[in-house]
Amino acid sequence: MNRNIKDTIVESLTGVCVLVIIFIIVAILTITIIGGWPNLNWTFLSEFPKDGMTKGGIFPAIVGTAVMTIIMAVAAVPFGVITAIYLAEYANEKSIIAKTIRFAVKTLAVVPSIIFGLFGLGFFIGFVGKNMDSLFSGGELKWGQPNILWASLTMALLTLPVVIVSVEEAIRTIPREMRAASLALGATKWQTIRKVVIPGSVSGILTGTILAVSRGAGEVAPILFTGAVYFSSNLPHSLSDQFMSLGYHIYIMSTQSSNVDATQPIQFATTLVLLLLTFSLNAVAVVLRYRIRQKAK
Amino acid sequence: MNDIKVKVKDLSLRYGTNLALKKISMDIPEKMVTAFIGPSGCGKSTFLRTLNRMNDLIDNVTIEGEVFIDNINIYDKSIDVVNLRKKVGMIFQKSNPFAKSVYDNIAFGPRINGISQKSVLDEIVERSLNQAAIWDEVKDRLFHSALSLSGGQQQRICIARSLAVNPEIILMDEPASALDPISTAKIEELIHELKKEYTIIIVTHNMQQAARTSDLTALFYLGDLIEMNKTEIIFSNPAKKQTEDYISGRFG
C-alpha cells in the first residue's frame, strides 16, 4: 500500500477516536445540564427529600457526601503520603519489603470497588465494630453496624493506592542532584525530605491527592454495605450515624422509584450536583498546581 | 608545602565486584588546591566522593582502607557522616541550587544547623555571597528564585551555599565543565581566592584548568593513582611516561 495512504488512514483513525471521546464528554454534559439545570435551585440544595423522593431536595445527600469525603481524605492522605515517602526515599528498590509493598499497592488498585465494600462490611463492621461494641458497650449494638466512619474508611482504602502512586511520582520528580546538594551540606535524610523534597513536590502531592479524593467522592459500591442509606430524616451528627450520599441517591432514584416521571427531574439535578462537585475539586487541583508553579518561578 | 589535611591510606572501592579504586594512598596539603585529572572512568570523581562519604548513598559500594582528615579516620564507626559533610563541602558538576530564593539557598545550611535569628542569617548570607564573589550581582535580588540566574551565577551560588556552613575542605567535581569561558574564568579566580582559607580539591577534565588553578596534581588511570606531584613538575617534567603521554594528549 502507498505510504501516503497509510498515513492518511492512521491520521483519520486517530481523529475519529478523539471525536468519540469528545462526543461522550459533550453528551454527558449536555444531557445532564439540559435535564438538571431547570430544577437546580436553592430549595433543591437546602431541603430534605419529600414524598418518597418525588419532591423536595437533596440536602442530606450533599452533606453526607461532603462529610464522607473529608473523613476519607483525613484517613487516606497522611497514610498514603507517608507510604509514598517510604517507597521513594527509604526503601531499597531491590528489597523484598519494597517489592511486596509495590505489589500490594498495584493489586489494591485493581481490586473491584464492590470487593472493597464487602471487605469493609466484613472487617470494619463485622470485626472492628463488633469487638468495639463488646469491649465498650457490653455488646449493645453501636459500632457493629454500617455508619459514616466505616464507609469513609472503606472509601479511604479504595483511594489509597491512587494517592500512593501519584504522591510517589510527584516525589520522584525532584532530581537526585537536589538531594545530593542537601546531604552534602550536612543535612540528615529527614531534613532533606522535609526541606527539599516535599516543598519541591508539594504541587504534585496536592494535585494527586485531590484527584484521588474526588474520584472517591462519587463512588457508590464501597459504601453500599458500609454506611449509606436510602433515606434518612436526619443529618449524621456522629461518626456512628448512617448517611445519604449523592451517588447512592442517584442509584436509588433510578432503580427504586415508585413514580419515574416525578423523580426524573430530581435525578438529573442530583447528577448535575455530583458532577459539579467532582469537577470543582479537580478545578481546585488545577488552580493549586498553577499557583504553586508560578510561585516557584 | 603546608601541613597535611587529608591523608589517604590504601583506599580501595568496589561497585559490586568491579574494582573502581585500587589501593590509593595520598597526602593532600591544607589551604592549597589539589587537582585530580585523568580520562573518563578513571576513578577521580569516585575518589573525590570518598572524601565526604557521598558514595555511602550508592547501594553496592564497598570501601576498604582509611581516609584521615585532621588525623581522624572518617570511615571509623564512631564518625557522624552529617558532621563530616559540614566540614567537607562539595560543589557538583551540574549546578544544583534549590528551587528557592537566593537567600534561602544560602541560609539552608545554617538553618538546618539550628540558626534561625534573622540578623545572624543575614550576616552569613552576605559574607558567603561576598566570598563567592557574587554579592554585587545578586544583592538586589536576594529574594528572587536562584533558578532565574545564569548557569555561572548558579554555580557561584552553590559555592556560597557550601561556604555558609563553614567547611574546612571544599570538594569540586568538575565545577566549570558546563560553563562558558567567562564564567569558567570567574570560578577559577574564585578558587584562587578561596585557597587562602580553605583546602580545595578539584576534579577536572580540562588540563589547562588543572595547570592554571592547582598547586598539586594527581593523575588517575583505570582506578590507579599514576603520579602525584607539584603541578608545575607534572606539567613540565613528569616522572612517568604515562603522565607525559596523557598531558601531551597522546591518550585519554
Image: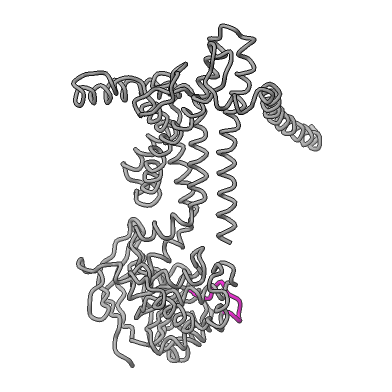
x and y percent of residue A25 in the render? 67, 29
View extreme (top): residue: A258
x and y percent of residue A184 in the render? 38, 68
Left or right? Give the position of A260 relative to A141: right
**Exactly how many numbered labels are in the figure?**
0
* Color style of the picture: one colour
The one nearer the camera, A185 or A160, is A160
Q: Magenta segment range? A: B174-183
- Residue located 52% across and 35% down the image: A214
Report if residue B180 lies within the magenta region. yes
Q: Is residue A29 above or below residue B136?
A: above
Left or right? Give the position of B94 relative to A132: right
The one nearer the camera, B238 or B165, is B165
- Residue located 49% across and 26% down the image: A219
x and y percent of residue B225 in the render? 36, 76
Image quadrant where residue B202 sits? bottom left
- Residue located 38% across and 87% down the image: B197
Q: Is residue B173 above or below residue A164?
A: below
Image quadrant where residue B115 sits? bottom left
- Residue located 56% across and 71% down the image: B178
Report if residue B171 lies within the magenta region. no
